C-alpha cells in the first residue's frame, strides 16, 4: 500500500508551504522541467473546463463569438501601439530561429493578442453594419515573469480567455464594460464562492493601452491581495494605432471604440487558497468535478450486504459525478483523508449498522458536520447540503474579506493596517506621483476604487483634494 502523507503544515502558520503542498498532494498541478510552467493535471483541468463552459455560455448570451488567432506575432505588429507594450517588453518571449536558420523577422509568442487581432479587424471592419464585432478566444499566453512562480497564481504560461470587442459608439462599449464586470463578479460569487472588491484601477495600475480598467480584487489568506478578472475600455487608442475605421450611416469615416477582458487559470489558485484548510482543498460544490464520494465500511462478514446497498446508492450519485470508493486495500480512515485532501464537498459513509437502519452518514467537507439521513431521502439531502456548503463557503470568504478592510486616514495608519496583513481603505486623490510615494513608503499598490463613492476631504497621503475611495494593499 502506497502511503501518501497529508499536509504537514498549518495554513495559518506557513501559508505558502501549505499552498504548495495542497496543490501538489491533491494532484491539481505538478512542476515540470520548465521553470515557471506547471502541468494542469486532470483534476484542475476539469475545473478549468467548467469555468470555460459556464463563462462561455454567459458570453454567448452577450452576443460574443469564439475565434482563434495565431500564437505568433510579427515584431512590427507588436510594436505598433508602443504605449501598451512599454513596461511589458522584458516579458515577451521570441522565436528567432527555425532549425538552424535565423528568421528574417523574429516572432513574439503572444503575451496577449491585441496586436495580432487588430490588423484583421482593420481589414474586416468597413461599415457600421460590420459592428459591433465581439470576438473571444480561449487560449494560452506566455509572459516571461521574473518574479517567483507560484502554481496557478503566477507563471510563465497560463490559460485564459481574451475578449476583444468593437463598437460604433462609446456608450455601447461602456455599456458592455458594465455587463462584463457584472459577469465576472457574479461568476466568481456563484461558482467559485469568492467575493471580490469591484472597482476602477488607478491611472498608475490600469492597462497602459486603456482609457480605464475595471477589476475584481481578492484577498488571499496571507494578507496579500490578488487581481482577478478584469475589463478594459480602450477607447479609440487601438483603432488609431491599427487603422480600424468604418463608414457610418452618413458615409462618414469614424473610429470605433474597443474593450478587452479576461479571466484566467489564476482564479483556480485563488479559490484553492481561500477555501482550503489544514486538511487540504475544500472545493465549492458548483465547481467540484466530483461532488460526492461514497465510502462503504467493509468488514469480511458484512461486506456483501453493504456493497449491495452501496451499488444501489451509486446509481443515484451519477448526477453528482459521485465516486464509489470500494478499494479493499485501503482502510476507510485512509480514504477519508485522501478525499478530504482532494476537497470533495460531501462524503457518504455506509457501514453495516447503517444498512440495517436503512440510513447513511453524510459528512460535510467544509465543516466536518455529520448528518444521518434515511436512504430514501439521500439525494434530496445531498442537494440541500451541497447548496448549503456553497453558500457557507461564500459567506465565510466574505466575512474574511470585509474583516480585513480598515479605513485609514494617514500613510502611517496604512502602514499599521498592512502590518496586520489587512487592506487599507482611504480617501485618495488618484494621482500617479502620490501612488508612487505611497508605494515607496508602504510597499502597497492601489487595488481599485469603488464605483459609487466619491472621496471626501483631502487625500489621505498628500495635500490634494481627494477624488476616490480606494483600497490599498500588498499584492501578488
Ligand atoms: C505582457 C507582455 C506584453 C499584460 C503583457 O488584460 C504585453 C502585455 O499587453 C500586455 N501583459 N498586458 C496587458 C493585457 C491587456 C488586456 N489584453 C486582452 C487584458 C485582457 C485581455
Image: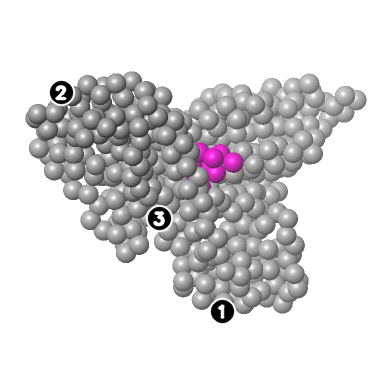
Display colour scheme:
one colour
Nearer the observer, 463 or 324:
324
Give the residue at x 64% y 68%.
426
Q: Which residue is mark 3?
A: 147
Q: Is residue 197 visible?
A: yes
Q: Which residue is mark 2?
A: 304
Considering only vertical position in the picture, is 10 above or below 301? below
Give the residue at x 33% y 39%.
372
Which residue occupies the extreme front position in the image? 357
- How far across and down, in percent of the image, does residue 225 sit? 50, 58
Give the residue at x 53% y 43%.
188
Please indicate whether residue 329 sits to the left or right of residue 221 in the image: left
Using a 10 Å C-alpha cutoff, classify the residue at mark 2 as few (fewer than 14 neighbours), some (14 to 19) or many (20 or more): few
Question: Any mark on residue 412, and which?
Answer: 1
Residue 89 is one of the magenta-drawn residues: no
Label 1 beta carbon within 8 A of ligand 1: no
Considering only vertical position in the picture, is 276 above or below 52? below
Give the residue at x 48% y 48%.
392
Q: CA distance from mark 1 to mark 2?
A: 68 Å
The residues colored magenta run 186-194
Using a 10 Å C-alpha cutoff, classify the residue at mark 3 as few (fewer than 14 neighbours), some (14 to 19) or many (20 or more): few
Earlier in the chain: of badge 3 and badge 1, it is 3
Do residues under tags 3 and 1 come within 8 Å of each other at their CB atoms? no
Q: Nearer the viewer, mark 3 or mark 2?
A: 2
Amino acid at each position: 500500500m502506497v502511503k501518501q502523507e497529508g499536509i504537514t503544515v498549518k495554513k495559518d502558520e506557513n501559508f505558502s508551504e501549505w499552498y504548495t503542498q495542497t496543490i501538489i498532494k491533491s494532484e491539481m498541478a505538478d512542476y515540470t522541467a520548465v521553470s515557471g510552467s506547471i502541468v494542469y493535471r486532470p483534476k484542475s483541468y476539469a475545473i478549468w473546463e467548467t469555468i470555460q463552459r459556464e463563462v462561455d455560455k454567459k458570453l454567448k448570451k452577450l452576443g460574443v463569438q469564439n475565434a482563434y488567432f495565431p500564437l505568433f506575432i510579427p515584431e512590427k505588429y507588436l510594436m505598433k501601439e508602443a504605449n501598451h507594450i512599454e513596461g511589458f517588453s522584458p516579458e515577451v518571449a521570441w522565436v528567432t530561429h527555425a532549425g538552424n536558420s535565423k528568421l528574417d523577422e523574429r516572432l513574439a509568442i503572444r503575451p496577449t493578442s491585441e496586436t495580432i487581432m487588430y490588423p484583421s479587424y482593420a481589414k474586416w471592419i468597413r461599415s457600421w453594419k460590420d459592428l459591433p464585432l465581439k470576438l473571444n478566444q480561449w487560449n494560452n499566453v506566455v509572459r516571461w515573469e521574473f518574479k517567483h512562480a507560484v502554481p496557478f497564481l503566477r507563471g510563465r504560461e497560463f490559460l485564459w480567455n481574451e475578449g476583444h470587442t468593437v463598437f460604433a459608439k462609446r456608450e455601447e462599449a461602456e455599456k458592455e464594460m458594465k455587463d462584463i464586470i457584472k459577469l465576472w463578479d457574479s461568476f466568481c460569487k456563484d461558482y467559485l464562492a469568492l467575493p471580490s472588491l469591484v472597482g476602477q484601477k488607478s491611472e498608475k495600475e490600469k492597462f497602459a493601452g486603456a482609457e480605464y480598467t475595471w477589476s475584481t480584487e481578492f484577498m488571499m489568506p496571507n494578507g496579500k491581495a490578488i487581481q482577478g478578472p478584469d475589463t478594459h475600455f480602450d477607447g479609440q487608442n487601438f483603432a488609431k494605432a491599427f487603422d480600424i475605421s468604418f463608414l457610418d450611416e452618413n458615409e462618414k469615416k469614424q473610429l470605433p471604440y474597443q474593450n478587452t477582458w479576461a479571466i484566467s487559470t489564476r482564479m483556480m489558485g485563488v479559490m484553492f487558497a481561500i477555501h482550503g484548510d489544514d486538511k487540504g482543498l475544500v472545493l465549492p460544490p458548483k465547481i467540484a468535478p466530483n461532488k460526492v464520494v461514497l465510502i462503504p465500511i467493509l468488514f469480511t462478514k458484512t461486506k456483501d450486504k453493504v456493497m449491495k446497498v452501496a451499488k444501489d446508492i451509486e446509481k443515484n450519485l451519477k448526477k453528482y459525478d459521485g465516486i464509489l470508493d470500494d478499494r479493499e486495500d485501503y482502510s476507510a480512515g485512509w480514504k477519508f483523508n485522501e478525499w478530504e485532501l482532494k476537497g470533495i464537498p460531501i462524503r457518504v459513509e455506509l457501514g453495516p449498522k447503517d444498512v440495517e437502519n436503512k440510513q447513511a452518514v453524510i459528512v460535510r467537507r467544509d465543516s466536518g458536520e455529520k448528518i444521518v439521513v434515511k436512504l430514501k431521502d439521500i439525494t434530496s439531502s445531498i442537494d440541500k447540503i451541497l447548496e448549503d456548503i456553497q453558500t457557507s463557503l461564500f459567506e465565510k470568504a466574505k466575512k474574511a474579506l470585509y474583516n480585513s478592510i480598515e479605513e485609514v486616514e494617514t500613510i502611517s495608519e496604512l502602514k499599521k493596517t498592512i502590518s496586520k496583513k489587512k487592506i487599507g481603505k482611504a480617501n485618495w486623490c488618484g494621482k500617479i506621483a502620490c501612488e508612487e510615494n505611497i508605494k515607496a513608503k508602504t510597499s502597497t499598490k492601489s487595488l481599485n476604487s469603488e464605483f459609487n463613492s466619491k472621496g471626501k476631504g483631502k487625500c489621505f497621503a498628500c495635500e490634494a483634494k481627494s477624488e476616490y475611495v480606494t483600497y490599498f494593499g500588498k499584492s501578488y
